[in-house]
Image (tube, rainbow, N blue to C red):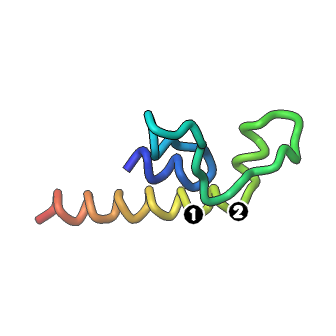
Amino acid sequence: MHLLLDSIGGGILWAAPFNDHLYALVTVPPTQDHWVLSFILHWSFLLEIAVWGTAVLFWRKRRGA
């Protein structure tokens, strides 16, 4: 799950060690003074929060069963 979430806005070396290209679905441009703020204000962060929220809902549902 960590690798999939990092593939949205970060970069993952999916073809390592054969290729050193970082693969990412979205490139987050540096629009703010700090890179963390740029990432939090980018739309792709909402996608990651949605994945986390869904995981928490499934976890709570399973834990209550």
* Residue for point 52% across, 40% down: 19
**Position of 55 relative to 1 (above/below):** below
Q: Position of residue 34 (x, y in %)?
A: 81, 34
Q: Which residue is mark 1?
A: 47
Q: Is residue 41 left or right of residue 31?
A: left
Q: Secondary structure at mark 2?
A: helix
Q: Position of residue 5 (x, y in %)?
A: 49, 51
The three-letter code of the residue at mark 1 reads Leu
* Residue for point 17% across, 62% down: 62
Q: CB atoms at circles 1 and 2 under 8 Å apart?
A: yes
Q: Which residue is mark 2?
A: 43
* Residue for point 46% across, 46% down: 14
Q: Nearer the viewer, residue 60 or 27?
A: 27
Q: Nearer the viewer, residue 57 or 41?
A: 41
Q: Nearer the viewer, residue 58 or 10?
A: 10
The three-letter code of the residue at mark 2 reads Trp
